[in-house]
Amino acid sequence: MGGDTNTIANTMTNKALQATLDKLSGQRAYLDTNCLIFFFDNKEPYFSVVAELVRACDKGQFFGFTGDVAVAGLMVHPYRTRNAAEIARGKAFFNRKNFITVLGHSAEVFDTASRLRATQNLKLIDALHYATAHHAGCTYFITHDKDFNAVESREGLEVIRLSDLVSQH
């Protein structure tokens, strides 16, 4: 019986993920730091979902973006543990051509982030990610951060929560 429940949950997850991939087709989407950490750390249940998103981005099904601050956040652990292989892996991942575009954070982006922090009660780092996505013309913002539960489509961005794409067994 447990196997049947898992099969149903996996089918539901696959449907939710496929619907999201269909929605992302041809669009611009920003990947929050937590997505990248789940991917690099191979952390389930989110790794499988993020791996599919990364694969779709790699195939050119949608245009992936992230920010310098997300890359910096991802690289903290490899630097802290002095893991040369993981440092090289992270750098190589973001140096690939025609893949995930890494964006800088301009004064205008920081100003928008400050406004979002003030009006949406987001942590400044989360507001910075969101503002960066907005200024890059993204239509989707993919995250696992619960701070975005109260943030609906603002600034022309629709929040996609990883938790909505993962079955809750």
Image (cartoon, grey):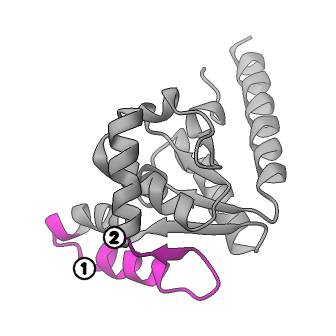
Question: Label 2, on which residue?
Answer: 107
Q: Which quadrant holds the N terminus?
A: top right
Q: In this view, does 29 lie to the left or right of 122?
A: right
Q: Distance between the residues labelled 1 and 2?
A: 33 Å
- Identify the residue at image location x=50%, y=26%: 150
Vertical placement of 140 versus 146: above or below?
below
- Identify the residue at image location x=77%, y=26%: 7
Q: Where is residue 47 in the image (x, y as percent from the top left)?
A: 54, 49
- Tell me the number on the disc at residue 84: 1
Q: Does the magenta stretch include residue 6?
A: no
- Identify the residue at image location x=81%, y=45%: 18
Q: Name the one closer to the observer, 114 or 7.
A: 114
Vertical placement of 138 versus 44: above or below?
below
Name the kind of residue labelled 1 in the image. Ala
**Residue 42 in sight here:** no
Q: In this view, does 119 lie to the left or right of 18?
A: left
Q: How crowded is mark 1: few (under 14 residues within 10 Å), some or many (20 or more)?
A: few
